[in-house]
Amino acid sequence: MEFFQNLQKVLRQNIREYGMFIALFVIMAIFTYSTEGIFISSRNISNLLNQTGYIAVLAVGMTLVIVIRHIDLSVGFLAGFLGAVAAIALVFWKLPVWVVIPMVLVMGVLAGLITAFPVAQLKIPSFVASLAGWLVYRGALLLSTMGTGTIIIPDEAFNAIGNGFIPDIPGLDFFLPKVHKLTLLLGLLAIILFIFSEIRNRRKKQEYNFEVLPLDIFILKLMFLSVLVGGITWVLAGYNGLSWTVVIMLIVVAIYHFVTTQTVLGRHIYAVGGNPEAAELSGINVKNITYVVFGSMGLLSALSGILFTSRLQSATTTAGTLFELDAIAAAYVGGVSAAGGVGKVTGSIIGALVMTSLTSGMNLMSIDISLQYIVRGAVLVAAVIFDVTTRSSRK
Amino acid sequence: MKPPILEMKNITKEFPGVKALSDVSFRVAEGEIHCLVGENGAGKSTLMKVLSGVYPYGSYSGEILFNGQVQKFSGIRDSERAGIGIIYQELALVPEMSVYENIFLGNEICKGWTVDWNETIRRASQMLAKVRLDVNPETKVRDLGVGKQQLVEIAKALSRDVKLLILDEPTAALNEDDSANLLDLLRDLKQHGVTCILISHKLKEVISIADTVTVLRDGKTICTLDAKKGEVSEQVLIKHMVGREINNVYPPRERSCTDEVVLEVKNWSAYDPKLGRMVLKDVAFNLKKGEIVGFAGLMGSGRTELARSIFGNPDGYEIMGEMYVRGKKQRFNHPKDAIQAGVAYVTEDRKAKGLILIQDVKQNITLANLREIASHGVIDGNAEVKVANEYRESINIKTPTVAQVVGNLSGGNQQKVSVAKWLFVRPNILILDEPTRGIDVGAKYEIYTIMNRLVQQGMSIIMISSELPEVLGMSDRVYIVSSGRISGELPIEEATQEKIMHLATN
């Protein structure tokens, strides 16, 4: 009986944090039911994750931009434009992949810094500065694809980024023949690492007399998340295993999660978002933080462009259209606050998954695109209302 | 005596934890200029907000009689309709709109469904003539100086047919000519039957214009003086304003002041390009090791501006003058530089400018010196908790754990977190701007104790304070700031509330 009381209490206290997971779970369950299991099939989940990739990396960058109370509208067409640059470099300039990718990433950082310049230096609203970028990069994209139209990319290594999967451990065909063993192994490792770090964390918090979850709830949480990760791994292993897109996405999330939670830079970013005046008076250079955050946004835009171009195996004239709004929506669904200083990178990834799950599920149900937009709009509003009301009711 | 146009009887207004007004009675005769004086926080503005309906009927106790009738204002609109106009220190004009639009804003002259702009301009011109302001009514308010903007505000009030005009420190931001002009106008309006309540810190001004003066202190009416009977003089006013007993709320301390000068500022002037005026003029002062120097003065006198201009100038003033830190000539271009040189600044507004309310205690304490608990840019969470817990114990921050969000703490504990944050940068010079504003007596005592301990250890403290007893109780030496200048320096033995108030209101 006590267990359920505890559970209720914990859920109520952390509704904001767990709400997103629960929502994702509910959405997935509904689609699984309504598509008679097709939604949860290995092939569909694998596809869904690959589709999420290029929005997810943008959402990660956008999280930080919104945390410091700005916005970047230019990222969609910047991604599209840099994707086209990558295609041109590969196809017409015949540059090797290992040159093209770093080159495009550097260009992304520069573009981000250019957007940041009027914002940081002249206090121009980022909405306006990045709207200008939106127009400029849209034009640049059209200009670079004007002569050729769609540019088909024949480079296999490049195309593998958006379509390929990690190789399996060779010589193990006798064991579980149709399952991707390396993926399973990595999933298992991830679960073990996760459980260990959670236990260590809990011990440390107890040492400091910080509040920790009751033991039974803690175990339940571990089990729930382990099953979730295990389930996803199993589903993926049943198709082609982990795709390179998912690997890149996981690396990006891991790095950004680490930076935002464990480093001085991360602390400075959240301080600027929480109270810019106090941050400045604490010796933090708000301008520099603005440059760093927009620079990182540019870098991730370039990465998003690479992922998308590679996935299509071509650069098109409309690549990147509306990516920025999808990324912003994902960040808000993931619990970022427009008031600044609040928002987690992991939340935005879940937000991105929620949004692509909706698209994927509704596609499978053959719901018309018009209704899809309306449903996604409703979910966005519902998520933000949920976020705002749970936040204010806590006080 | 003429019949009263306004009578406020037994007004009591409480805020959570503070009694801002207790049993105040206030009576204004028709056609007079009635000045309301008192120290910062005496309750003048609160009283005027009760009168004008900003604090609606029911949120205070007591009775308001205006024009002989009991009034129950539930908002500013009600008091305006009754004929009360109030002009605040911060002007309520829309800078991007023209003078005539501003004058009739919220009170538009309509013909059918549309605004009659021609009639508006004609009437606005009449109003401008009344306040003797010679500008084209189509000028944008943005393009007028503060003095003229003030007149536009008065014209706006007059356009609504006010019988009682309240001005809250109208001359605080004006130069002498504009001030004199404004006072002339008030005398003029008096001839035309407008009653005036004037809140002012400038006692000379009060003496020159007032028919009657009421003094408030600590939320109570102290006395009402009649100028015609010769009851009003500077000495009398100051005596009534400060005449509070100084209780022994200051911890005893052995003087630890040495002769070693750690900070010296000379010919220090600052121009604020945003306001377009000088905020500091030719300031000079020094601070010695182990000393607490009090900076007294009225609000807006330039004390905070002085502190911020020293502490890395985050407001972007254009600064002239020299500053020596421990004998070395220096100029800080960013708070970061100041922190590195061992200067710390605890702001006067901890919520808006000092703390990050949505973050927890430990994150706030370590923010200005993360380097000390990080290696290669990665924060050591254990070290952070350890540091935070040390400060929690040493300066007694009352919080369940250091993982508590700062916004949930009481004012006194928030202030201790601010202090802890700045102690963690290990400064030699600590600037405390209104260190005890809005915190209870117990927490005040603790802050004073911490200050004493710090100077014993050889730190030097600049304490900016609007509370005279605090200045007298804590300082080794007092500088008085008035209108961006140092108007006086007093060793603590010679300092009295009267002397300080005299220099501050000069």
Image (tube, coloured by chain):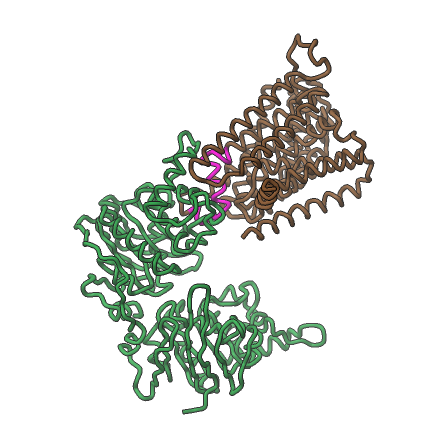
Chain colours: A brown, B green
Image quadrant assignment for residue B205: bottom left
Q: Is residue B147 left or right of residue A232?
A: left
Q: The C terminus of chain B is located in which quarter?
A: bottom left
Of B237 and B360, nearer the camera is B360
> Is residue A259 visible to us here?
yes
Residue B370: percent from left, percent from top: 40, 38
- Magenta-colored span: A259-280
In reply to whether residue A370 is colored magenta, the answer given is: no
Q: Main secondary structure of the magenta part?
A: helix
Q: Residue at 75% of width from left, 37% of height from top?
A: A30
**Does residue A217 sit above or below B13 in this rendering?**
above
**Does residue B384 sit above or below B202 in this rendering?**
above
Residue B272: percent from left, percent from top: 40, 56
> Is residue A72 visible to us here?
no
Q: Residue at 60% of width from left, 38% of height from top?
A: A347
Q: Is residue A134 left or right of residue B22?
A: right
